[in-house]
Amino acid sequence: MMTKSSIVKDVEWAIGSHRTLLRINGLWIYSEKYSWLAVAMNIQALLLTLSIFGFVTLPQTVALMKTWGNVTLIGDNIMSNLPAIMAGIKLIKMWTNKKILVTMVKQIENDWYQLNNDTERDVMIKYAKIPKLMLLCGLVNITSSTLLYHVLSNFFGITLRATSNLTDIYGDKILPLQSVYFFDLSTTLSFYLISWSQLFGSLVASLVYTTFDITFGLFVLHTCALLENLSKRIHNMPMDSEVKFQKTLKSTVLQHCALIR
């Protein structure tokens, strides 16, 4: 039996973690009453974007120009540089459209409150489990793989990329990412500061890249759940009374038009 409190719990279970993920990326909108939070979100998104481009993309792009002509080094560079560039573009794209993004998330919440029976609730839960699993697996995968790659390089000296005297010019110290800087990294302090900044930038890029894909998956799967509920309503309409038939038909058409938009 559905109650208001149970629906609130269902909504929090279904999209609570996704909202948190958007807030972490600075992609949330607050009312004018909390204008300072809106400013904080914008600053947060800006800092994350600068972290991706400043710590990962720019140094690797300089290295790419320096190694141009060497297919092995170019391929090695692009494998880590291109996803970071895409992550930065995704974050900028989501930030410029965050009003639409937040509106869609809130619409998902409203759809949960408009469920008619436990059967429709079960359908929504069935589809909501998939993006939650995607979120869990995605975050575990990106965090573990990024940490493993950088920890092996920083602590054990195991470099999982091609090295050359074109970009790796800091003696026996090898940075995790193929990169070139315009200042001296021969001192231990400066080298490890840059190395840890690459780790931070890589984690941010991985988080943003995953957030975009998981959020898109959430929208698609939620739409699938609504369409399945609509199909079941249409299937059961012939068994309704005339008054209920007209009411169900009207609500079904309106919801279908809303889904198309």
Image (cartoon, helix red, strand yellow):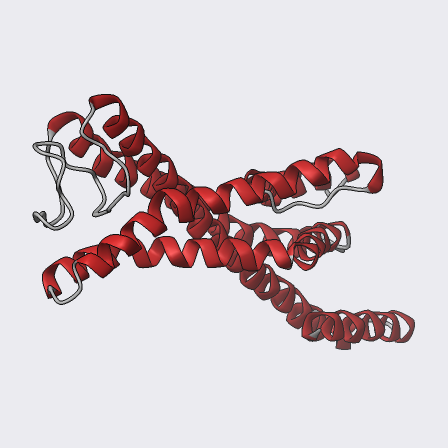
Quarter assignment of residue 151: top left
Please state if 108 lies on the left or on the right of 147 as rendered.
Answer: right
At 34% from the left and 56% from the top, the residue drawn is 83
At 47% from the left and 59% from the top, the residue drawn is 89
The answer to which of 251 and 170 lies nearer the viewer is: 170
User: Hey, which residue is sitting farthest right in the picture?
Assistant: 243
Identify the image quadrant of the N terminus. Answer: top right
At 48% from the left and 49% from the top, the residue drawn is 211
Q: Is residue 238 above or below residue 90?
A: below
Asked if residue 75 can be seen in this view, the reply is: yes
Q: Is residue 107 above or below residue 28?
A: below
Identify the image quadrant of the C terminus. Answer: bottom right
Where does residue 146 sit, x and y in percent of width and height?
29, 40
At 36% from the left and 42% from the top, the residue drawn is 55
Q: Is residue 12 above or below residue 219?
A: above
The answer to which of 54 and 49 lies nearer the viewer is: 54
Where does residue 69 sit, x and y in percent of width and height?
13, 67
Please state if 131 lies on the left or on the right of 84 as rendered.
Answer: right
Where does residue 6 sit, x and y in percent of width and height?
71, 37
User: Hey, which residue is sitting farthest top in the picture?
Assistant: 189
Q: Is residue 174 above or below residue 161?
A: above
Quarter assignment of residue 18: top right
Where does residue 107 sit, x and y in percent of width and height?
72, 56
The answer to which of 97 and 108 lies nearer the viewer is: 97
| Numbered disc total | 0
Please state if 163 lies on the left or on the right of 23 as rendered.
Answer: left
Asked if residue 213 can be seen in this view, the reply is: no
